[in-house]
Image (tube, grey):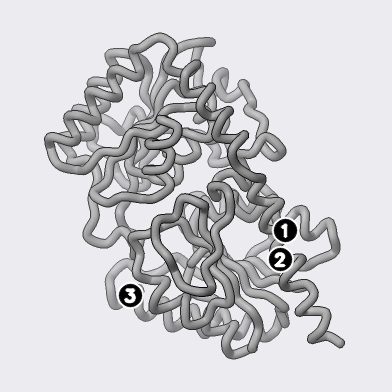
Amino acid sequence: MRIFLDIGHPAHVHYFRNFIRIMEGKGHRFMVTARNREHVTELLNHYKIPFVDRGAGGRTSLGKILYLVKTSWQQYLRARKFKPDLFLDFSTIYSGFASRMLKKPYITFTDTETTGLYRFFIRPFTKKVYTPVCFSRYLGAEHKRFNGLMELSYLHPRYFEPDASVLELLNIKENEPFAIVRFVGWSAVHDRGKQGFSLRGKIKLVNTLQKYGRVFISSEGPLPEELEPLRLRLPSARIHDLLFYATLLVGEGATMATEAAILGTPAIYLADFKLGNLTYLEEKYGLVLNFRTSEKEQDLALKSAAMLLSRPGTKTNSGRQAEKLLEDHEDVTAFVVNEVLQNYDELSRKEVN
């Protein structure tokens, strides 16, 4: 089988890298296209996944529209040359046109309820959309839920083993409490009109956390001058090692909050919208605390963060809950492999014959 896979975000590299490795081991071939953005190309190169750079994307509304039109056409030209049997992505919106033109099945994944992109740019083209078990919306007859979270496709124990050398790399002592703070850029299409911590809130958060342990900041954009020295400088592929050993994660990034929870690190997530997976992780496992962006909610998030970072036993408790989470869910990469082989490999063989 020949699979055309589009990557738009660093997390997508992780979602599909084990799937690529397993499928290539079975003799299947890939063409990977990727957006040129923070950490995407670095991760693809790290995992030795050949790819075609499809550009960085537009910044203004007009630029985004022009990029969509141009890239959709270029994806069609690339796919026509590659001759795929299947199109696959994580709702990047650039595969639908090519799949329709070439009359090939297109399947996609999503875990974000707040985006309207699916309805307009994906649903008219896709054969199947897969979401985690906790996805709160119904996306129609083509919607199928799996018993897991996307992050289990690479953080399941079959694929991830923490490397403690990351602590030495950052001069962190054994059992030293530390927090990771994650700020996002809010520039993605599905983030339009949304926000996280205020500038004042960011500074207050970091200053408070520093009373109880070291703080490392992961940020998609510029930081206030006084916070810049705390910016995390670590190869992208090592972030999950650091998350595993962290005492706490606080931030605006939903993916990193989910990753932390799976790895047994409690997470505090702040945004002005709800996501099914983070609500699920809070209500069923207590591994995430969700807050809104009002000043009152930011202050509550700050107090919760200080309490978790300073309290003995925080990691022990969250570790037990993470073990339960793993017991309750399936290996997502194995699910994707089986789903593709059972439903689409047979289809591609019929078309060849």
- Considering depth in this image, is 145 or 159 the residue closer to the camera? 145
* Looking at the image, residue 303 lies above or below residue 131: above
Q: Secondary structure at mark 3?
A: helix
* Residue identifier under label 2: 340
- Separation of disc 3 and disc 2 at Cα? 34 Å
Residue in the image at 28% along x and 73% along y: 61
Task: Give the class, few, some or many, for how many residues have Cα within 10 Å of label 1's Cα (few <14, many ≥20).
Answer: some
What amino acid type should be assigned to the residue bearing mark 3?
Gly
If you read the primary sequence from the N terminus, does the residue marked by circle 1 or circle 3 appear first? Answer: 3
Which quarter of the figure has residue 85? bottom right
Find residue 130 and report its horizontal and vertical position in percent: 55, 62
If you read the primary sequence from the N terminus, does the residue marked by circle 3 or circle 2 appear first? Answer: 3
- Considering depth in this image, is 146 or 203 the residue closer to the camera? 146
Q: Secondary structure at mark 1?
A: helix
* Looking at the image, residue 140 lies above or below residue 133: below
Contact, CB < 8 Å: mark 1 with mark 2? yes
Find residue 163 and report its horizontal and vertical position in percent: 64, 26
Quadrant occupied by the N terminus: bottom right
* Residue identifier under label 1: 337
What amino acid type should be assigned to the residue bearing mark 1?
Val
Dot in front, 3 or 2: 2
Is residue 1 rendered to the left or right of residue 149? Answer: right
Quadrant occupied by the C terminus: bottom right
Contact, CB < 8 Å: mark 3 with mark 2? no
Residue in the image at 14% along x and 41% along y: 294
Find residue 301 and report its horizontal and vertical position in percent: 24, 30
Is residue 268 rendered to the left or right of residue 161? Answer: left
Q: Point out which mark residue 63 bears.
A: 3
- Separation of disc 1 and disc 3 at Cα? 36 Å
What amino acid type should be assigned to the residue bearing mark 2?
Val
* Looking at the image, residue 40 lies above or below residue 295: below
